[in-house]
Image: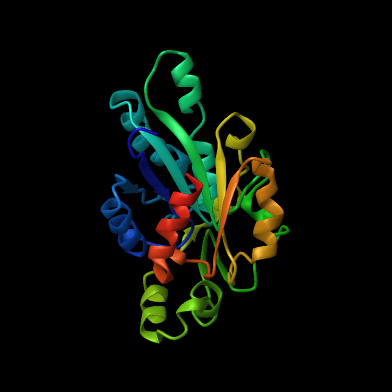
Amino acid sequence: MSSKPTIVIVPGAWQKPAAFAGIVAKLQAAGYPTIHVPLPSTGGVAPIGLSDDIAVVRKVLLPLIEEQGKEVVLIGHSAGGISASGAVEGLDAASRAKAGQTGGVLKVIFLAAFVVPKGQSLLDMLGGNPLPWMVIEADRVSGNPDMVPQVAFNDLASQPDEQAKWVREMDYTSAALFASPAAYEPWANGIPCAYIHTSDDGALPLPVQQAMAPQLGAHAKSATLKAGHCPHLSVPDDLVKAIESVL
């Protein structure tokens, strides 16, 4: 790459933009134009689901790529892996270059994220049932506040005020997101992918991450952080290095 790509962060469930403000600032300071995309499924209710999240991400991507000719890397965190995957269809840089067009998606990075095969849903990846720390109320899903600190923010245990802050900053997510099947696999359609593992993850345990990541192919780059599920909060400097290592 002659210049640094634009990074588009696609969050998972429950977390508001404030949770990503720090890592956005650090990536920008490292020279990467960076955009965080708030998804409508967070704070939304059914029928808002995966297709709505994908549409919002594409609304960010299309002007960057088609109007500005930018090279883009997507980072999907947690459930954002399925949304990032769906959003890149038809936008890969290699195909655009062959067509004489500039810009496009260079890579999708899965950050402690779900790699969901076409036709399967997030709920399928969870074995068909919500996890014990998930609270289902009609058409919305939230995290049990008594369990979330150790599930999502266990590596902030030495900073209880920070743990409590980020628990308060969580919202509910539309149940429809978890039931929607994936429609596109970037790794199977010529888009390079990478995986950043989190070794101390209480929400998406490392063995589960390691079971999903091989779908990305034998040449997919990877990195491992000693962190819980939200390294953008606990080890942001290490996360920037990990992102650069898999670009």
Q: Nearer the viewer, residue 238 or 138?
A: 238
Left or right: 59 as drawn, with respect to 182: left
- Vertical placement of residue 73 versus 232, above or below: above
201, above or below 42, in the image? below
Residue 99 falls left or right of residue 205: left
Q: How is the image coloured?
A: rainbow
Residue 56 x/y as whole percent: 39, 41
Instruction: Locate residue 73: give its quadrant.
Output: top left
Work out which quarter of the rendered image holds the N terminus and state it: top left
Residue 3, how many percent across, how many down? 32, 36
Q: Residue at x 46, y 27 (%)?
A: 93
Q: Is residue 124 visible?
A: no
Q: Which residue is found at the position 73% from the left and 59% from the top?
A: 127
Seen at 65% across and 50% down, the residue is 213
Relative to 140, 32 lies left or right: left
Residue 14 at x, y = what percent? Answer: 45, 62
Q: How many numbered discs? A: 0
Q: Nearer the viewer, residue 52 or 185?
A: 185
The picture places residue 24, in percent across and down from the top left corner, at 32, 55
Say which of 158 and 82 sits in front: 158
Residue at figure coordinates x 48%, y 75% from the top left: 153
The answer to whether residue 142 shows anywhere in this view is: yes
